[in-house]
Amino acid sequence: MNTFKPALLASAISAVLINSNMAFAAEDAIEVDKSIETIQITATRRAGSVQDAPLNITALNGDVISDQNIGDLEDVARWVPGLTISDQGGREGSPIIVRGLNTNTSDRISDSGTVATYVGEIPLSIDLRLTDVDRVEVLIGPQGTLYGAGTLGGAIRYLLKQPDLDLTEGQVTGDVFSINESDGTGGEFGVVFNTPLIEEKLAFRASLNYYDNPGYIDYTHVVQEPGVSNPNPDFSDSSDVNANLKSVSDVNDEQITTARLSLRWLATEDVDATLNYFYQKQENGGNSTSQYGSLADSSALQGIPGKYENVARVLEPGEEENDLLSLEVKADLGFAELVSASGWSSY
C-alpha cells in the first residue's frame, strides 16, 4: 500500500527551488567572470588584444609579474602551457623546451636554437631578470614569418616599461628569502626612477636591481691547494682526506645585477623614438648539479654524495655580462605603422 508523505514532497520541492536559485546565482557569477582584463600585445607587429591574436600566445603583464613574484623564465614557464624551462642553475644554459620536442639553451655558444628571445624588437639570447618589465609575450609554434630563423619552436619577447612623458615617480622594492638546504639568506633590491625632461616631449627612466641567491649545493671534496694537494687521497684514511680536501657549502650561489637607462622622445604626434641601454651581469659560485646516487660502482666515492652534494675537486665559478644598446623608432603613417629597430649587443 502506497502512503503519501507531504513532508518529503515539500522537502523535495524546496531542494529543487534552492538548486534553481543556486543555478541562477552561478549563471550570474559566470557572467561577471566573463569580464576579464584585456592585455594589449604587439607580437603580431601590430597592436591588439591577446584574445584576438591569431596565434598561440600567452602574455603576462607587469601586474601579474609583480603580484606573482615572477622573476625569470623558469617562473614564466609555469604560466605558459607547452613551455618548459629545464633549470640547470645559473652557471649552465637552461634548455627551453616547447611542447616536449624542440629545445635550445640560453647560451650564445649554441647556434642550433629553436626558440628566439627578444628584448623589445632586438634579438638577444638572455634569461632576463624580470624587473621594470611591462610584459612578457610567449609565442608557441613556428614564427619564421615574423621573427625569422631560429623560431621553429617559438619566440619569447621581453617588453620593458617605457619612460612616462607626464609623470615623475620613483619606486623602491625589496625582498628577503631563504632556501631549504641553504645556510645563507637571499634577497633582492631594486629602484626605479622616471621623470619628464620636456613635458609631453622628452622623458628619462632608469632602473637598477640586485638579486642574490644563496645557493644550496655543497662541494664536499674540493682540493685544499690546486696543483699541490692530492685530489685522490686514501679515502679510507680520514686524516689523509682532511689534509688534502675540504668542504665548501652553498657553492651554487648566484648574483645578478641588472641596470637600464632609457630616453624617450615624442618628436611629433606620429613619431615616437626610444633609446635604451640595458646591462645585466650574472655571477655564479659553482655548478648546481648533485651527484647523489649517480657515481659508478667503481668510483671510490660511490654512495658518499648526499642529496645536495657534489664531489668535484675544484670550484667552478662562472660570470656572464650582457650589454644592449638599442634605438626604436615608430612612425604612424596613417595606413600603416613604420617601425625601425637598431641594436648593438656585447656579451
Image (cartoon, rainbow, N blue to C red):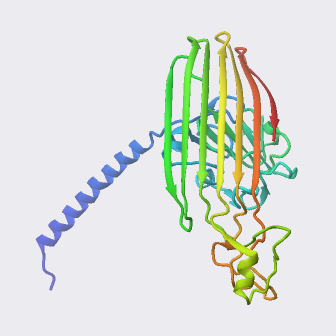
Residue 25, percent across and down? 31, 50
Residue drawn 17% across the image and 67% down it = 11
Above or below, 295 against 68 in this view is below
Would you say residue 50 is visible in this rendering? no
Q: Nearer the viewer, residue 61 or 225?
A: 225
Quarter placement of the C terminus: top right
The quarter holding residue 133 reads top right
Along the viewing direction, whichever of 142 and 197 lies nearer the viewer = 197
Depth order, front residue of 221/155? 221
Residue 256 % position (x, y): 65, 46
Question: Where does the N terminus fall, quadrant-wise?
Answer: bottom left
**Residue visible at 54% across and 42% down in the picture:** 189
Quarter of the image for residue 236 reads bottom right
Q: Is residue 259 above or below residue 238?
A: above
Horizontal side of residue 336 vs 187, given as left or right: right
Q: Position of residue 289 (x, y in %)?
A: 71, 68
Q: Residue at x 64, y 29 (%)?
A: 47
Picture quadrant where residue 97 is located:
bottom right
206 relative position to 45: left or right: left
Q: Position of residue 169 (x, y in %)?
A: 49, 24
Query: Residue at the spot x=56%, y=68% of the render?
Result: 181
The answer to whether one can see residue 182 in this image is: yes
